[in-house]
Image (cartoon, rainbow, N blue to C red):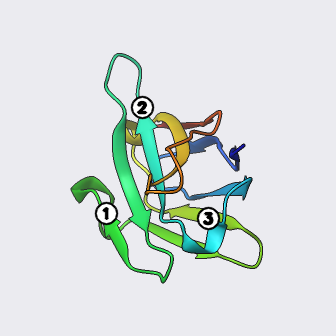
Amino acid sequence: QVQLVESGGGSVQAGGSLRLSCAASGIIFNINAMEWYRQAPGKQRELVAGITNDGLTNYAEFAKGRFTISRDNNKRTVYLQMNSLKPEDTAVYYCSNRPNLRTARSWGQGTQVTVSS
C-alpha cells in the first residue's frame, strides 16, 4: 500500500519561503515520477510541479521561477522549495505519485500553506 506523508507547511508572510517534504513508502520510489498539487478553497486541485525518476522536471506557469521540485531517492522523499510566496499561493499542498502500469495514483493527506499579505 502506497503511503505519502507531507510536511513543512505553515504560515508565512508574502515574499517568504517554505520547503515542503513528502516521504513515500509502499512503492518502488526510484522508478516513480512524483508530483505536487495544490487546492485552494473553492477551487479545483491543480498541478504545481512534477519530477521523473531521473530528475526531469515540469512546472505550472505560476510556479516557474519561484518553486523548485527535487527528490532524494535514497531517502524516498520529494521536496518542493517555494520562494517569493504570494497570498494566492495559499492552499493545501498534496504529494502524489504519477500513475504508471504498476502503480495507481495515491495522495498524501496534504499540508496547509498560508501566505499573508
Name the amino acid type tagged 3: Val
Badge 1 marks a residue whose secondary structure is: strand
Does 99 sit left or right of 96 as displayed?
Answer: left
Determine the image quadrant of residue 76.
bottom right
Query: Which residue corresponds to the image point at 59% horizontal and 44% vertical from the top-left?
Result: 12
| Residue 59 % position (x, y) | 31, 63
Badge 3 marks a residue whose secondary structure is: strand
- CA–CA distance between discs 2 and 1? 16 Å
Crowdedness near tag 2: few (<14), some (14–19) or many (≥20) residues, C-alpha within 10 Å: some
- Can you say whether 52 is above or below 84 in the image? below
Crowdedness near tag 3: few (<14), some (14–19) or many (≥20) residues, C-alpha within 10 Å: many
- Can you say whether 52 is above or below 107 in the image? below
Disc on res. 78: 3
Q: Residue furthest top?
A: 42
- CA–CA distance between discs 3 and 1? 15 Å
**Which of the pair 52/70 is nearer the observer?**
52
Q: Residue furthest bottom?
A: 54
- Look at mark 2 in the image and give the residue it sits on: 39
- Can you say whether 23 is above or below 104 in the image? below
Disc on res. 59: 1
Query: Which residue corresponds to the image point at 77% horizontal and 72% vertical from the top-left?
Result: 75
**Mark 2 touches mark 1? (CB < 8 Å):** no
**Placement of the N terminus among the 4 image quadrants:** top right
Q: Tell which circle, 3 or 1, labels the residue nearer the N-terminal end.
A: 1
| Residue 61 % position (x, y) | 22, 58
Query: Which residue corresponds to the image point at 75% horizontal and 79% vertical from the top-left?
Result: 74
**Placement of the C terminus among the 4 image quadrants:** top left
